[in-house]
Amino acid sequence: MQVDIRNRPSFANLLVQFSPGDSIIAEAGAMATMSSNVDMKTRLNGGFFGAIARRLFGSESIFINEFSASSPGELVLTQPFPGDIVCTELQGNTMLLQPGAFIACDPTVRLSLSWAGIRSWIAREGLFRIKVTGQGRVWFGAYGAIFEKEITGEHIVDSGHLVAYEPTISINVGLAGGIFTSFFSGEGVVTRVRGQGKIYMQSRSFDGLAAWTNSHLL
Amino acid sequence: MRHEMLCRPAATAVQFKLDQGESLTCEVGAMIAMSSGLTVQTTSKSRGGGGGIVKGLKRMFSGESFFLNHFTAEAPDQTLLIGPTMLGDCVHHAMRGGTMIIQGSSWLASSPDIDIDTSWQGFSSAFFSGESMFWVKCSGQGDLFMSSYGAIHCIDIDGTYTIDTGHIVAFEDTLKFNIGKASRSLIGSFLGGEGLVCKFQGQGKLYYQSHTPPALGALLGPKLKPK
């Protein structure tokens, strides 16, 4: 199965080319186009309560689609906002994704919900996050372009700009500077990530778009 | 007339070089900049069918009319720069006879020899969600320019192909289409988030966009202030 990420970083979408017997798991509503020999099966995203929890807390769809083909075919998967998509290959390790970032994965990868902690919720990074484990590729995306960074020690990421991170990283909330700076710098509360591992950040925040749009509504 | 695509694929604009006497028809509001030797004339076409004078006036005030700007060069070597409203791509299609059915908001510009017909109603049964899309039928010979929200890709269909209707930019009318469910089970189609999809059959070109404004709107809407 060949998967290409096209049109990065502004309107990234996945072009999946199936060989007979291949399949891919994708979030509901991600399909843009597909050739007619591709089969789509919908199922609950991990048990009934698991699916509801994933919707409420992980901003992920209740249902998940499995696309498979018994003859060569193609499928285009996309995300609702304009932005970048990145692929990471899991080799038995785990990756933690922010709510809404997951797009697709190989069927050998396991998706579950993971508690992110009160501090993460205060940092407006969400109470839960999506955990992907196993062997295989995972595609995730965000509003804006995605940057990857290896961190050792502490790093600061503005709230709304963290996309994914390895479980060796812990999330903490902090003020951008002193009380005065935090209030007037426009940064307010920021997320402090600490540990050794990889983090993915996005160059635009969706909440930023909402705030900007709101300021222009009469 | 020569054209050049600038700043693909996210903020694409099309730059034209027109010689004396040449003209171009564009959607209203598309003009970004132009040289002083170009004159503009605005005409309108009704969206979605005929009716009498009163209906025509009603449509004009209800915003259902489709206005066209005709740019004509009165001097040699004029430049015209046009672009669509939303972030996205533009694509050029050379028409040599035949007909293209284009999503109304995707039609950007065409050479004056191309006939524009706004009364095509083929998909009106497909939109339960209240999305009102209108479709423009273009036929003849000349240059056609289309825009999209997202990146534009082209497929030469030979056989059958399935597409989520919101992603269609344009297609040749040699293709037969059928609005159907995405998977074999009806419940599965709706819960899988795809709902109704369009299945094309035959031979012809299909232009599609990688993203759709309603998907962005569905996520952004709940975060906006109530009116």
Image (tube, grey):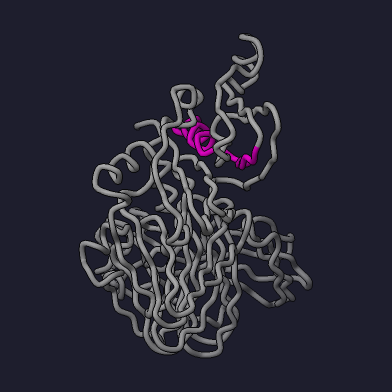
Q: Quadrant of residue B34?
A: bottom right
In this picture, residue A89 sits left or right of residue A38:
right
Q: Is residue A205 magenta?
A: yes
* Residue for point 32% across, 57% down: B193
Q: Which portion, as a residue range, is magenta?
A: A197-217
Q: Closest to the observer: B58 or A14?
A: A14
Asked if residue A49 shows in the view, the reply is yes
In x, y percent, where is residue A51? 30, 46
In this picture, residue B118 sits left or right of residue A202:
left
* Residue for point 49% across, 46% down: A101
Placement of the C terminus of chain A among the 4 image quadrants: top left
Determine the residue located farthest toward the right in the rendered image.
B77
Q: Quadrant of residue A158?
A: top right
> In this rendering, is residue A45 above or below A33?
above
Asked if residue A218 shows in the view, the reply is no
In x, y percent, where is residue B180? 27, 73
Q: Closest to the observer: A60 or B97?
A: A60
* Residue for point 27% across, 67% down: B126
Q: Closest to the observer: B8 or A7?
A: A7
In x, y percent, where is residue A9? 63, 54
Determine the residue located farthest toward the front in the rendered image.
A92
Q: Closest to the observer: B218 or A170?
A: A170
* Residue for point 52% across, 72% down: A1
> In this rendering, is residue A79 above or below A116?
below
Q: Is residue A201 magenta?
A: yes
In this picture, residue A74 sits left or right of residue B143:
left
Q: How many marks?
A: 0
In x, y percent, where is residue B141? 56, 87
